[in-house]
Image: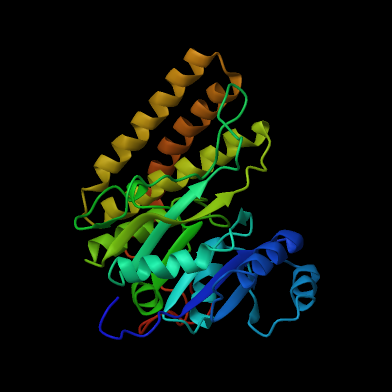
Amino acid sequence: MSGGDPEPTVSVVVPTLDRPVKAALVVRAVLAGEETPLEVVVVDQSAGEETKSALEAIGDERVRYVSHSPPSTSAARNAGARAARGEYVAFLDDDVEIASGWLAALIDEIRSLGRPDALFGEVHAPPGFAPDRIHLPVSVFHVEQARVWENVVHPNRVGYAANFVCRRAVFLDLGGFDPRLGPGSPFPGAEDMDLGYRLLKAGHRVASTPGFEIVHQQWREPDELPRLFYGYNLGGAAFCAKHLRSGDLRPLRFLLVQVAGDARMVASALRRHSSVRARVAAARMAGTWRGLALGLRSLGGESPRDPGTSPGSPPAGGS
């Protein structure tokens, strides 16, 4: 950017649970990049000390360790953002791979897109991984061209939390990720959809860009996919229910998109004669309708604030 604007400072937050080797690999990759962050905050939800020991072995003062319990991806990310000191917080999962230019590209995108409040980057499957009759890619996201969203759209078009950057002040003001959604919660999905939607509804400048990218390891076995996609759709429908309960009818369209996706998976299973896709399709449909029913019953429209995220937060333990 022109006009002598200061360099954006970036803190990287990595939530992890019982993956000391993977977490350490992600941290080492970040620190070995062409550009390095202000800090890497690792939020460890593990019961043991293995992750802490693996990080201490790196021996870099920029690595900050935060212990967090009980396990909750959303709450762990929120804890990392509270502990961070950068203008922007970049979130990475512990099962991703980044190139040496990842952070340099991210900073370039912040500048070139006019310092947006939030950015979502691309998430790829590993080279050579392709969907077939016996396997499906998980949590991948492709962006055709960079854009700053001017209107509220389906949050699946905006991006996923595996490669997500947000201005820290904005993130905390919104209350961060809703801890009632995402892994570790009763609705283990759609926490990123919910936050993206709240960012857009609040009028923040949210960008999607192919300019910075990661690889999401596809480590799950095919037999694990039905349960995984059940959880994704359980969360997706609960996200819709949450906002419907607040009087916002726009998520009805999002729910129809999810139902249409379930139908396409059924058609794909029949076309490919794939038992895995058939089981995923059944699991998705079950997750959609159960998530809607449970969400309408149990989720209020307002996102609870994690302790310390903003004025008016509940006391510790209240989230």
Q: Is residue 234 visible?
A: yes
Q: Quadrant of residue 192?
A: bottom left
Q: Quadrant of residue 317?
A: bottom right
Looking at the image, which is closer to me, 226 or 97? Answer: 97
Q: Where is residue 66 shown, x and y percent of the image? A: 64, 78
Q: Which quadrant, please, contains the N terminus?
A: bottom left
The structure residue drawn at horizontal position 51% and vertical position 26%, both measured from the top left corner, is 282
The structure residue drawn at horizontal position 59% and vertical position 38%, both measured from the top left corner, is 227
Whether residue 38 is situated above or below residue 130 in the rendered picture: below
Give the total of numbered labels.
0
Q: Where is residue 91 shown, x and y percent of the image? A: 51, 65
Looking at the image, which is closer to me, 315 or 183? Answer: 183
Whether residue 63 is situated above or below residue 240 in the rendered picture: below
Q: Is residue 296 visible?
A: no
Q: How is the image coloured?
A: rainbow
Q: Where is residue 174 shown, x and y percent of the image? A: 34, 72
Please indicate whether residue 253 sits to the left or right of residue 290 in the image.
left
Please indicate whether residue 19 sits to the left or right of residue 275 in the image.
right
Whether residue 148 is situated above or below residue 135 in the rendered picture: below
The structure residue drawn at horizontal position 39% and vertical position 77%, both measured from the top left corner, is 172
Q: Where is residue 148 shown, x and y percent of the image? A: 26, 59
Whether residue 268 is situated above or below residue 308 in the rendered picture: above
The structure residue drawn at horizontal position 45% and vertical position 51%, both measured from the top left corner, is 122
Looking at the image, which is closer to me, 43 or 255? Answer: 43
